[in-house]
Amino acid sequence: MFIKDAWYIAAWAHEVKEQVLARKICNESIVIFRDKATQKAGALRDRCCHRGTPLSYGQVVDAGLECGYHGLVFNTAGTCVHIPGQAKIPSKACVQSFPLVEKDEFLWIWMGDPEKADVSKIVDYPYHNDYGKWPHKHEVYHVKANSMLMVDNLMDLTHLAYVHKSTIGGSNANAHIEAQMKVTPKDTGLHFIRWLLNSTPPPTYKKAVPDIGERVDRWMEFEFVAPGSVIQWTGGLKTGLDAQNNRDQEGGFSLRIFHGLTPETENSCYYFWSAANGYRQNDPQATEDLFHEITVAFSEDKGIVQAQQRMLDETGTSGLVDIVSDQARVHMRRTVTKLLAQEQQSAA
């Protein structure tokens, strides 16, 4: 089951140019394209109303998206605007359209009731629009696992010392296990911050900022916005600089990451992420190096979560237990369950 009345990331904006883009979102086959005249992107059900052919087999023409089978053309609203050899267009000649909004380098799609598609509910991420202070690179992974398993992974950061020893985690598991953590529940998600005080900086930090020191105060701040957005600000300052009261200082390590999880099917999803360099903004190589480090780490996440999905497919979820580090994850799951129940009740 998926929350439908919500904004999901359908694509990075640059993925949709002259060519069409086919994606499956919440088990629905979607085709995304740009109107040639306005350059506005639109999202339609990937099924022609004539013979049921996927519209993604077609091409973008001046009037809209042309079906690759018999040439019917549809605009971004799903209305048929041209039928070869036929002057009158039947009123039923249309395909379902989905609200689609371009914002902060993303294309956001609403899969539920279009009357409820409130643009103000789209997550704000202004850092994508500030390449001066937050130069960044981004990626999208196709993950063969339920999107909620990927969100689970982001809610329990004790895994960093086990999965990411050589990059962003470091090898001191106790530092992660004993971190100070504060979780603040919200109606549509949660906020949490973790502090690893007077700890050894992990390899990624030392590569990025060689003079960061041997002991740092590290923070990991996350905000989850249901159903699939996680905003992260992570960094570290040399111990003694009062990082807990002033994190925005020069001389330390700092990065911002956006995580967007969009369900494809019950057992697969798209993982959109970006990594922004907040420490050597005028050095393009620093941004490249950071992207490489995060790519390695997130590939590790992808591998272990896909393995988890395969095992759960085989054995089911019975017998699994929660532990103390699951605090944020458990609240996240309860929030998603509550929102899904509210949506189902409203539909009924």
Image: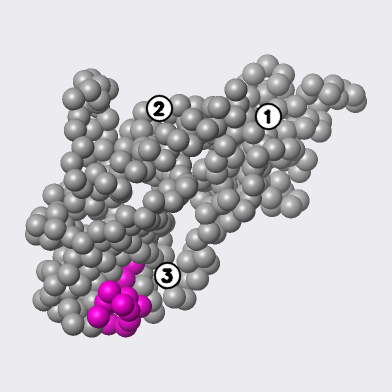
Tell me: 62 left or right of 58: right
Is residue 45 visible to us here? Answer: yes
Q: How far across and down, in percent of the image, does residue 286 sit? A: 31, 72
Magenta highlight range: 242-255
**Which residue is the site of mark 2?**
266
Whether tag 1 and tag 2 are in contact, CB under 8 A, the answer is no
Mark 1 secondary-structure assignment:
loop
**Which residue is the site of mark 3?**
135
For discs 2 and 3, the disc positioned in front in the rendered view: 2
Residue 80, located in which quarter of the rendered image? Answer: top right
Q: State yes or no: residue 251 in magenta.
A: yes
The CA distance from mark 1 to mark 2 is 22 Å
| Image quarter (top left, top right, bottom left or bottom right) of the C terminus | top right
Tell me: 323 left or right of 43: left
Question: What residue occupies the far right of the structure in this picture?
Answer: 87
Tell me: 104 left or right of 247: right
The CA distance from mark 2 to mark 3 is 34 Å
Is residue 56 visible to us here? Answer: no
**Which residue is the site of mark 1?**
96
State whether residue 74 is above or below residue 155: above
State which tag comes first along the sequence, 3 or 1: 1
The label number, if any, that marks residue 272 in the structure image: none
Mark 3 secondary-structure assignment:
loop
* Callout 1 amino acid: Gln
| Image quarter (top left, top right, bottom left or bottom right) of the N terminus | top left
Residue in the foreground of this view, choosing between 209 and 332: 332
For discs 1 and 2, the disc positioned in front in the rendered view: 2
Q: How far across and down, in percent of the image, does residue 77 sit? A: 73, 37
Residue 290, located in which quarter of the rendered image? Answer: bottom left
* Callout 3 amino acid: Pro
Whether tag 3 and tag 1 are in contact, CB under 8 A, the answer is no
